[in-house]
Amino acid sequence: MQAWTLWLAGLPGSGKSAIAKRLRYKLEDRGVYAQILSTDELRKVMTPNPTYSEEERETVYATVVYFAQILNMNGVNVIIDGTGNRKKYRDLARNTLKRFALVYVKCPLEITIERERNRRNSTAPRSIYEKALTGKSATVPGVNVPFEEPTDATLTVYTDRMGASECADEIIYNLWGRFF
């Protein structure tokens, strides 16, 4: 079976990374293997001093899609863990990758702010919402940079109602026959 890419897109703090990890483990238990491509991890290599400018975001997302394409061509399934705040970034993946699904990790902004404030042991940048709300940053999706909600997601999971493990189960249940 041809490799696939699943993109978990949503606001910072919505639970994308937690779901990606749980999903990978649950799939491995079923004999399905996938590589997680985390935009937070890739940024450390690509842009050690990130500006989060529109141009930088375009480069990061184009690179993520390119890596996913190469991995898929070599039989490796991919889970992208990335905000994907613009439709054009997600459309690039949809139009480039042969077997692609977009999962919208939906969570109200006020909950993502609280989660980010209490986040520990994460590769994500720290205090982004605090910086955005106090005017120290002008690049946070959902606050001072648009987050274009996916209206064409293959599946939406609601992380204000379900935990990461339940969301992973929901993804597997809904996409099993199509992708896994």
Image (cartoon, rainbow, N blue to C red):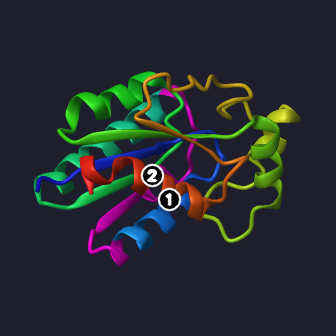
Q: Position of residue 46 (x, y in %)?
A: 41, 51
Is 147 displayed left or right of 60 in the figure? right
| Quadrant (top left/top right/bottom left/bottom right) for the N terminus | bottom left
- Image quadrant in which you'd find residue 42: bottom left
Q: Which residue is drawn at 83% across and 50% down?
A: 114
Work out which residue is located at the far right of the displayed protein and give it.
134
| Membership of 53 in magenta stretch | yes
Vertical side of 60 occupied by 94: above or below: above
Determine whether label 1 and label 2 are within 8 Å by CB: yes
Q: Name the residue under label 2.
A: 171
Vertical side of 59 occupied by 26: above or below: below
Vertical side of 38 occupied by 160: above or below: above
Look at the image and give the residue range highlighted in magenta: 28-54
Q: How busy is the neighbourhood of tag 2: few (under 14 within 10 Å), some, or many (20 plus)?
A: some
Please tell me how many numbered marks the rendered image carries.
2
Work out which residue is located at the far bottom of the displayed protein and give it.
29
Q: Mark 1 and mark 2: span between their CA atoms?
A: 5 Å
Is residue 12 visible in the rendered structure shown here?
Answer: yes
Residue nearer the viewer, 96 or 162? 162
Q: Which residue is drawn at 40% across and 22% down?
A: 88
Q: Identify the amino acid type marked 1.
A: Ala
- Disc 2, SS: helix
Q: Residue at x 56, y 22 (%)?
A: 148
Q: Identify the amino acid type marked 2.
A: Ile
Is residue 67 visible in the rendered structure shown here?
Answer: no
Q: How busy is the neighbourhood of tag 1: few (under 14 within 10 Å), some, or many (20 plus)?
A: many
Residue nearer the viewer, 72 or 25? 25
Is 164 displayed left or right of 86 in the figure? right
Is 22 displayed left or right of 102 in the figure? right
Q: Position of residue 15 (x, y in %)?
A: 62, 53
Q: Where is residue 43 in the image (x, y as percent from the top left)?
A: 48, 52
Q: Residue 168 carries which label?
A: 1
